[in-house]
Amino acid sequence: MNAPNVEKHEFQAEIKQLLDIVIHSLYTEKEIFVRELISNGSDALEKMRHLKLTEKNIFDDKLDLEVSISTDDTANTITIQDFGIGMTKEELVGNLGTIAHSGSKQFLQALKEGGDKSANLIGQFGVGFYSAFMVADQVKVYSRSWKEDETGHVWSSDGSGSYEIEEVEGQRRGTKIVLTLKEDAKQYASDSTIKEIIKRYSSFVQFPIKLNGEKVNTIDAIWLRGKSDIKDEEYTEFYKFQANAWDEPRYRLHFSADAPLAINALLFVPNENPERAGFGRIDPAVALYCRKVLIDSKPDELLPEWMRFTKGVVDSEDLPLNISRETMQDRALVQNLGRVITKRFLKFLAQEAKKRPEAYLEFFDKFGFFLKEGVAVDPTYKDELAKLLYFESSAQDKGNKTSLADYVSRMKDEQKEIYYIIGQNRESIESGPYLEGFKARGLEVLFLYEPVDEYVMSNLREYEEKTLVSADQGDLKLDDVPQPETEGSLSDDEAKGLCAWLKETIGDKVKEVKVSDRLVDSPAMALSPDAMSAQMRRMMRQMGQDNSMPAEVLFEINPRHQLMINLNKQREENEELAKLITLQAFDNSMIAAGLLEDPKDMVTRMYDILSRASETK
Ligand code: ADP
Ligand code: MG
C-alpha cells in the first residue's frame, strides 16, 4: 500500500522507450553510469558555486562543494551524493520524468539507425541519468533544492514505466542517488572497482570526489600546466572527459598568451564531425573558465558560430568571476577573448596545412564545411579562412584539391582573375560548354560542388587582389586565342547574319545572340546575364523565390562548329526545319546551363526532328 502522500507518475512515452533500450540492449560499458552520475553531481555543484556569487539566501549554506560516494557490498548499493543546487519536486518531475532535452530523441534515433549499442553514446545526448538503470533495479533520488522555502523529496523508480515522488524530512541540500544493484551488477558495490572507474573517467572533475570517506581525485586544471609535462594520453583523456566524447581528437592546440589578454587555452578538433553524421546542429563546447573556475560550459558568445566544431577550455584571469551576459562591458570582453583565440586557431590550422598537408586535407574533408560557413556568414575572418580553403580544379586530377594560394602561384603573368565553375560534380562541369574556352587558353578553373560555395565565392569576392570570377558569367572577356579553322567556318558577316536570325527565331527568351570567344568544341552556350550562377538560381527557386530565373539569357554560338555552318545554309533552304533545330539547340544549351525549367516542349520538338531525320528519301 502506498502512503497517502506518495504520488505516482507515468514516464513520458519517449522516456519509456529510452529506458527499455537502456535496460535491455545496452550491454557494454555499463560502468559509465558512474561517470554520468558524478558528472551530474559536478554540474549541480558548479551551478551552486555560481549562485553563491549572487544569492544571499541559500539553504544549508555551509556545506562543502563535493561529491561523495559510498558503497555497501552487503546491501548491494551504491550511493552518490552531491551538495549542489538540488531539485524541487517540479524539477524532479521535469528533469527525470520527461524529455527535457531534444537530445533524448536524437539518442533514440541514433540507436535505431546506427545500431551502435555502446552505452558510451548515452552521455553525449544529455540522457546520462538513465544509465543508472543499466545496473540498478531500484533507483532512489533524494533531493533538496537550495531555495530556502522548499522541502525535500524522494523520487523512486524501478525503470519499468512509472515513478513515485514523496516528501521527505531532514534532507540536506543537493541530491543523493541510491542505486540498488541488479544481480549481475553487484561488482559496483565494491570500493576498489568504483575507485578504479572514477580514476578512469572522472579524474578531471573540478570538485573533490570522496569514496567511502577518502578523497580519490586530484583536482587538476590540465590547461594551466606546461605543455612539456603533459603526456599525449593525458590530453586525450581530458578531451574525452571535457567533450564527453569517445573518439580521439584530430587536432589539439594548447597555448597561453599574456597580451592583450591573459589566456590559457586548450582546444581540440574531434575526429568525427557529428553534424555530418546527421546528429543535428552541435552546441558550442569550448568552456569558459576564470582561474580554474567554470564560468560557462557552453558560452555562445565566446567563439563565432562556425567554430562550434571545436571542443576544449579557455581560461582567462582577466574575466570577472560573476561575469554577466547583460553588461556590455563583459560581453565585449568575452568577444575580445574569442577573437584572440579564433585568430590563434586559424593560424594553427594554416601551419598544419603546411606541415602535414595530407592530414589537413582529411580534416578539411570532414570539417571544411565549417570554414566555408565562416566565410559565407561572417566577414570577420574571411581573409584567414580563405587561406584554408581547398578545391578541385582543372589543373588537378579528380580527388586532388588545391588552395587558392597554389592556384595563384600557377597563374600566368597576364592572368588577373581567378576562375571557378559551380556544378553538380566534376563530370558535369567537364562535359559542359563552359570549360572549353578556358582550357584552350590554358587557364585553370576551380571546380566547386557544394551549395555553400556560391556564398563563399560571393562573400570572398577576391583573393590577394585577384577577383574571383564565375566562368559561366555573361560579361566575361577572355583574351583572343587562335581558333582551329574548320572547313566552311562562317565569315564574320555570315556569323553576324546568323546571329540576327537566331535572335529573331528564339525571340524574347534571349537578350542577345553573339559569336563566342569561349567556345571550342560545343556549338553554343547559354549564359546568365548577371553574376548569379544557375546553381544559385536553382537554390533560390527551391526556397520559393520564383523570380530567380532570368527572363532573358545570353546565347553565344561557335561559328566554326558544323551545326552552325549547316544551320546557316538550312535557314535559306528549309527555314521550318532550321527553326526547329535552333529552338532545340537553344534548349540544349539551357539544359547545360541548368536553366531549363520545363522540358515538355523540348521533348515534343525532339520527336518532330527525329521523325524528319528518319524519313527515307
Ligand atoms: P544532462 O546532464 O546532460 O542534462 P541527464 O540525463 O544526466 O542529462 O540529467 C538530466 C537533468 O536532471 C539534468 O539536466 C539536471 O537538470 C537534472 N539532474 C540530474 N542529476 C542531478 C543532480 N545531481 N543535481 C541536480 N540536478 C540533477
Ligand atoms: Mg548528465
Image: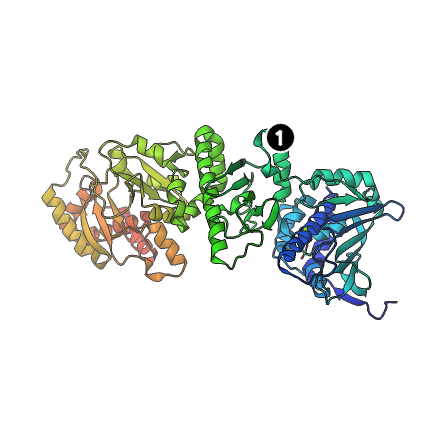
- Indicate the quadrant containing the N terminus: top left, top right, bottom left or bottom right: bottom right
Give x and y (percent) for residue 476. Answer: 23, 44
Which residue extends farthest right? 74
Which residue extends farthest bottom? 4
Give x and y (percent) for residue 502. Answer: 18, 52
Q: Residue at x 61, y 31 (%)?
A: 230
Q: Is residue 23 left or right of residue 204?
A: right
Of the pair 292 and 517, the residue shown nearer to us: 292
In the rendered image, the vertical position of residue 589 relative to residue 91, given as above or below: above
Q: Is residue 12 left or right of residue 247?
A: right
Q: Quadrant of residue 446?
A: top left
Query: Quick one: SS at disc 1?
Result: loop
Colour theme: rainbow
Of the pair 372 and 34, the residue shown nearer to us: 34
- The quadrant of the picture showing ligand 1 is bottom right
Give x and y (percent) for residue 518. Answer: 23, 40
Give x and y (percent) for residue 531. Answer: 28, 50
Q: Residue at x 66, y 41 (%)?
A: 204
Q: Is residue 119 left or right of residue 295?
A: right
Q: What residue type is disc 1 on?
A: Lys
For disc 1, the marked residue is: 231
Q: Residue at x 34, y 48 (%)?
A: 458
